[in-house]
Amino acid sequence: MDFAFTEDQRFIRDQARAFLDERATFDVLRKVVESDAGWSQPLWDAVGGELGWCGIAIPEEFGGSGLGQVELAILL
């Protein structure tokens, strides 16, 4: 059995890591957590809209990406 990530899965992992390294640093997250809102609209817009992470395991017919549990686990 081969448990290695596929090329697409490695791409998801690498893009997620790059995004989080750039836009969700500890300093940014600390400010978000300490804010009155406790969350960041720009980060949610990027995660849900630009990157589509919220729909990664949702079938395409329902507006998601149609990927599976492994891809979801990579993001988690």
Image (tube, rainbow, N blue to C red):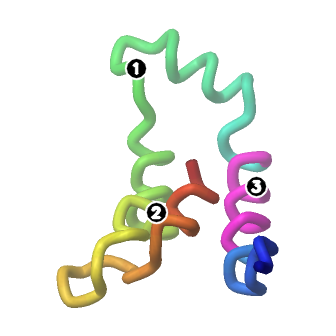
Q: Which residue is mark 2?
A: 53
Q: What kind of element bears circle 2?
A: helix
User: Which range is magenta?
Assistant: 12-21
Q: Residue 24: horizontal and vertical position, in percent?
A: 66, 39
Q: Describe residue 73's horizontal placement relative to residue 35 as left or right.
A: right
Local packing at callout 2 (Cα closer than 10 Å; few below 14, some 14-19, many 20+) is many
Q: Earlier in the sequence, mark 3 or mark 2?
A: 3
Mark 1 lies on residue: 38
Query: x, y (%) of residue 49?
Result: 39, 66
Q: Main secondary structure of the magenta part?
A: helix
What residue did someone put label 3 on? 17
Magenta residue check for 16 = yes
- Residue 61, position as x, y percentages in the image: 20, 89
Q: Which circle, 3 or 1, is nearer the viewer?
A: 3
Q: Position of residue 60 (x, y in %)?
A: 29, 87
Q: Extreme front residue here?
A: 1
Q: Amino acid at mark 2?
A: Trp
**Residue 45 versus residue 32 in the image, above or below:** below
For image coordinates 31% across by 77% down, the residue present is 64
Residue 16 vs residue 28, the one in the foreground: 16
